[in-house]
Amino acid sequence: FLVLFNTFWCLAFWSHLQAHLADPGTVPKRWEEFVHSFRGAIPIAPSRPEFQPGKATLCKRCQRSRPERAHHCQFCGFCVLRYDHHCPWINNCVGYRNHKFFLLLVFYGCLASFFALATSIPELLSCAGILVGLEDPSNLAGKNLATPTVVAFLAFGAIALFLSILLTLLLITYVPF
């Protein structure tokens, strides 16, 4: 169990680093050169909140042309190709070049939290029973656990449960089944 959990955790950590450090996919200079080379043959539509399929738009903030599905990130201050959202957990935009790493982070984090929760359920139930009074407190002494340790173990179990639910819901919204 130790090897599997640490493998999932290390993969989640590596995916987090890659999603954080990778360029989300800024609009390349080639795009502007391409648009300018056609001298008005490619219409640049004004930016609107709704989706504009098949149209290049002009960014209101950058005042630069951008391809379809590129949007300006107010936190980063530039336009991102295939912009999804700005994620505070990775402190970066999720876009064309780091979307894969973001999905891998969610997937491996979900696996690690489920695995941590599944392997600790017997101890969590025992600690909860001792704390509530359903189980004999002599079990606490037999396991050499102090009350603060039991409370900390239950708190980490609650965090693992919360993360597994949150990451599962996030994974369901991103991955079509």
Image (tube, rainbow, N blue to C red):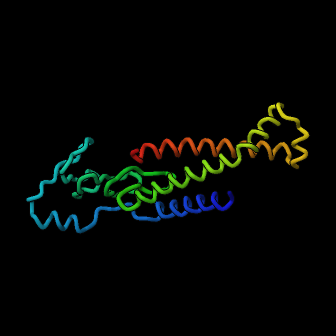
> What residue sits 84% from the left and 34% below the top?
135
Q: Is residue 44 above or below residue 126?
A: below
- In front: 166, or 47? 166
Q: Quadrant of the C terminus?
A: top left
The residue lying at 40 percent from left, 57 percent from top is 99
Residue 4: percent from the left, percent from the top?
63, 59
- Kindly tell me whether residue 79 is visible in this rendering: no
Q: Percent from the top left, x then y, of residue 154?
A: 73, 42
Where residue 48 appears, as percent x and y from the top left, is: 23, 43
Identify which residue is drawn at 62% across, 42% down: 161
Q: Residue at the location (50% across, 56% down)?
A: 105
The percent coordinates of residue 32 (x first, y second) are 21, 64
Depicted 80 relative to depicted 49: above or below: below
- The answer to whether 159 appears left or right of 45 in the picture is right
Count the labels in the image: 0
Residue 44 visible in image: yes
